Image (spheres, rainbow, N blue to C red):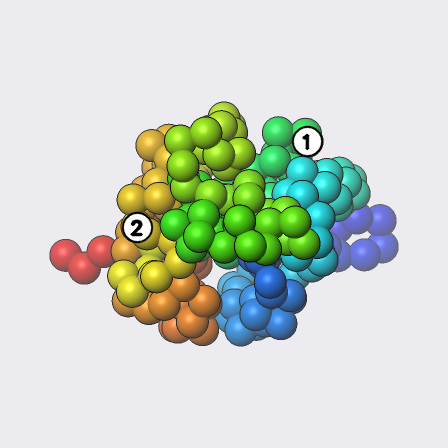
Amino acid sequence: MVSQGSKSVPREAVVLVHGLAANRFIMAPLERALASCFGKVLNWGYPSLWSRIEQHGTSLADFLRLLDCHAYERIHLVTHSMGGIVARLALGLFTPRRLARFVMITPPNRGSHIASRLAPYLGRICPPLVQLADHDASFVRSLPPPQVPELGIIAADADFLVLEPNTRLGCERDHITVPGLHSTLLWRRETFEQVRHFLEHGRFHRAA
């Protein structure tokens, strides 16, 4: 702990960001697990369905600006699904001075084939579906890679929403595939252990 006036504040903060059609509840198990290892865990929520991803990225950037005013020595990001894209946009607008490590869980970095199928029918009421399509000219594929110190990506081996190759960016420090589905991965102990290990060491844990 470090002292800030008469108060003691944690040395590290972890910001959680959920994905499309979800809320902070889905990140709650991970929040509780990480709270036992890190000083401050902030489970950030946003109305994911009805606005374009840029709007959410702007909101997250504003949140990170406020967080950057605190005396944390390191700030980490942990995202699920579309939350990773929201965070990429946020970091393009504002990067905390002490940003450390960024873990993406099942991110559609190169789009989702399911989003491509649903976009013609639901894209007008749910704009992110259009943006997350997996064709070459899609919004998400046009984004520049994130400029972060250390990026780790976790894919699910039974993910029917985001295929493993589409989670990759090419600039990540480490990438691992673990057992689970797209969303239930968040509730598996192995996922927590891999997130914790990356935040602590900058790499995922692999058995010798």
Q: Mark 2 near mark 1, Cβ–Cβ under 8 Å?
A: no
Which three-letter amino acid code belongs to the residue tagged 1? Phe
Residue drawn at the location 32% of the way across and 52% of the way down: 163
Which of pointers 2 and 1 lies earlier in the amino acid sequence?
1
Looking at the picture, how far across and down is residue 84, in whole percent? Answer: 52, 46
Please tell me how many numbered marks the rendered image carries.
Answer: 2
Residue drawn at the location 30% of the way across and 50% of the way down: 164
Disc 2 designates what residue? Answer: 164
Pick the residue in front: 159 or 119.
Answer: 119
Check the image and report above or below for 98 versus 33: above
Residue drawn at the location 53% of the way across and 49% of the way down: 120
Looking at the picture, how far across and down is residue 186, in whole percent? Answer: 46, 67
Disc 1 designates what residue? Answer: 94
Quarter occupied by the N terminus: bottom right
Quarter occupied by the C terminus: bottom left
Pick the residue in front: 46 or 67.
Answer: 46
